[in-house]
Image (tube, rainbow, N blue to C red):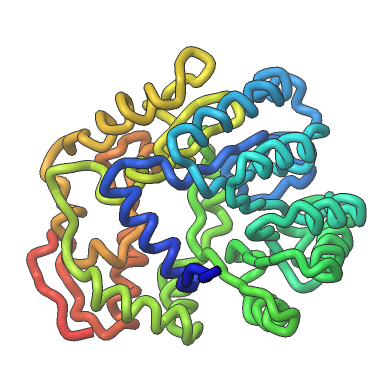
Amino acid sequence: MECPHIPEIKYGEFSEHIHKKAVATRIPLNGAIEVTYRCNLNCVHCYCNLPISDSAATRQEMTYDEICNIVDQVAEEGCLWLLITGGEPLIRKDFIDIYTYIKKKGMIISLFTNGTMITPGLADYLKEWRPFSVEISLYGITRATYERVTGVPGSFDRCMRGIRYLLEREIPLKLKTSVLTLNLHELWDIKKYAENLGVEFRFDPIINPRLDGGKQPCRYRITPEEVAELDRKDKDRFREWKEFCRKFWGPGNPKIVYNCGAGLASFHIDPYCKLQVCELVKNPNFDLRQGKFKEGWYNLFPKIRAQKPEGDNNCAKCELFSLCDQCPGWAQIENNDINMPVEYLCQIAHQRAKILGIKEVEKNGRQSKAAV
């Protein structure tokens, strides 16, 4: 009997191909579900964490049955990749039940965790029911620095144990860090540690306010000059920025508010059953306790993305737009106005332009770039 030839393609090629199809046909292919905002740590920069003992938050959170019902709905509409995140998702007593239900739906699961609650038993379970990846935030390579960020004594040792448990079982692991004034001096040592383990590492040097508008995290932002210098020093990051500019250089569309991909093939669900275009855009949202996922996806999301800016939307006209992290969600929580640019992000874009060898541009976007 002849055996049909099934060609192999790399995962990246498969993912890129299917995502292009999903965007073109508005399939909600990629989702994130925050199962709680509560956390066992108290990180100084966190945009959403609540105390682990917050009883009011616990009462409002999605139940296991609600989560299963939502997972059924998003699977029906075509969701393939699903991120489980928080807060710290492992604080939920029903975490394994939630994880298993999603896994049995055939979804490709990523898990974001601080790693401090990973036990040998949980690691054994993840080895049997393998996720696509587990991402752990490592905020320092020394106990002192890590715990200055997390605010919890003993958390560094628990995090390092969690990392070890996953590595011993060869569970796909990625490490990452948020770069703060508190841990900037250890960034390259954290990166070296990850490389020595043979795991992927990434860092995020840009900190946003809390979802409730609280500005506490902003106290720990590094300067725009320091952000750009990190982009320059990291060879891979610098190369990727150069390549990105070659592909996507130029202004955005000044006639719309949302120049990003939020809500095209992706969605976000918060712990209280609110469907959002992304984690930063709290309003408008769709209450999944009052209606079905498909109603929010097909009715509300197109209206959100069709919003017109108030005023001239000079940011979208700027030649540095592709270097800038401006987004309506960030503007909403930082300025309480989706149309008001975040000055910190604008400054970073101009600093990036300098390190990439791009001519300084006027903030009204009239000047053009030099060769990259």
Locate residue 230, reporting x and y percent: 49, 77
Residue at 58% across, 66% down = 179
State the residue in front, 128 or 300. 128
Q: Closest to the observer: 128 or 139? A: 128
Residue at 68 percent across and 41 percent down: it is 104
Rendering quarter of residue 305 = top left
Would you place residue 146 above or below residue 48 in this image? below
Q: Is residue 302 above or below residue 169?
A: above
Q: Which quadrant is the N terminus positioned in?
A: bottom right
Q: Position of residue 264 (x, y in %)?
A: 33, 44
Q: Is residue 155 left or right of residue 331?
A: right
Most foreground residue, 173 or 12: 12
Residue at the top extreme, as displayed:
290
Q: Is residue 43 left or right of residue 234?
A: right
Query: Where residue 350 sits: x, y (%)?
Result: 29, 70
Dividing the picture into quarters, in which one does residue 159 lie?
bottom right
* Residue 354 seen: yes
Q: Quadrant of residue 192?
A: bottom right
4 with respect to 42 (left or right):
left
Residue 253, x across and y down, in percent: 15, 51
